Image (cartoon, helix red, strand yellow):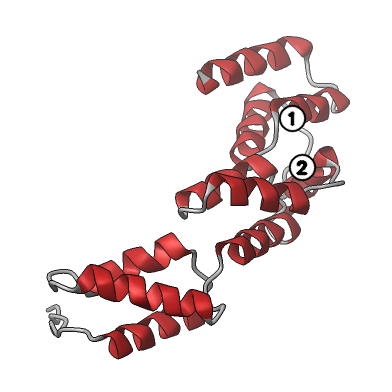
Amino acid sequence: MSFARRKSAYDQAALYEYAVSALARRMRSVAELKRLLRQRVAGQSDGEELVEAVVRKLKDQRYLDDSRYAAAYSSYRRENEKLGSLRVVRGLKSRGIHGDLIAQAVSATYAGVDEEKLARAYLARKRMAKPANDRETAKIFRALARAGFSGATILAILRKWRVDEEVIGLLEEQGSQDIR
């Protein structure tokens, strides 16, 4: 049995309280918060104006800042999850961050980072070792590509592990077809 959420009209103060509690649970981008607030005021005639007013107030109070969000997000993904920059860019785009802010945050976060060393740290975090056969090699290739590492970095790691050049060539060809 599901319980229906009560449908009540929100005024600016109530919507502001909801927004602050949503931001207290976790950091959000402007686009994410607007999406959340629009769901709350769906069907209200003044809903869009309320959302804009609340977002403006939160920005003025510095509770909501996409550049800080992008910097924190990319830093967390690099330090804790050991993800590559391409994956971080995809994640920020999906959260509605503007391209210029993404470029600034990711370039600042990944400046001076050795991508191969980061990829090796990712592999260690995922407990992936040198592949014993072609299937494991493909699995590692796909995992590193999903984690946001460049093809050149992935191939450099596989070559240092002395993986068969024929297998590397097939994976490189398959990777370039997936990009298209």
Residue 88 visible from this viewpoint: no
The spot of residue 169 in percent (x, y) is: 70, 11
- Mark 1 vs mark 2, CA separation in Å: 8 Å
Q: Is 85 located above or below residue 177 in the figure?
A: below
Kindly state the secondary structure of the residue where label 1 is placed. helix
Q: Residue at x 52, y 72 (%)?
A: 64
The three-letter code of the residue at mark 1 reads Ile
Q: Residue at x 32, y 90 (%)?
A: 13
Quarter of the picture containing the N terminus is: bottom left
Residue 111 visible from this viewpoint: yes
N-term-proximal mark, 1 vs 2? 2
Q: Nearer the viewer, residue 17 or 73?
A: 17
Kindly state the secondary structure of the residue where label 2 is placed. helix
The spot of residue 122 in percent (x, y) is: 73, 48
Marks counted in the figure total 2
State the residue position of label 2. 119
Q: Nearer the viewer, residue 157 or 164?
A: 157
The spot of residue 179 in percent (x, y) is: 54, 22
Q: Nearer the viewer, residue 148 or 38?
A: 38
Image quarter of residue 167:
top right
State the residue position of label 1. 154
The three-letter code of the residue at mark 2 reads Ala
Query: In the image, is 146 to the left or to the right of 4?
Result: right
Q: Is 129 located above or below residue 133 in the figure?
A: below
Query: In the image, is 53 to the left or to the right of 45?
Result: right
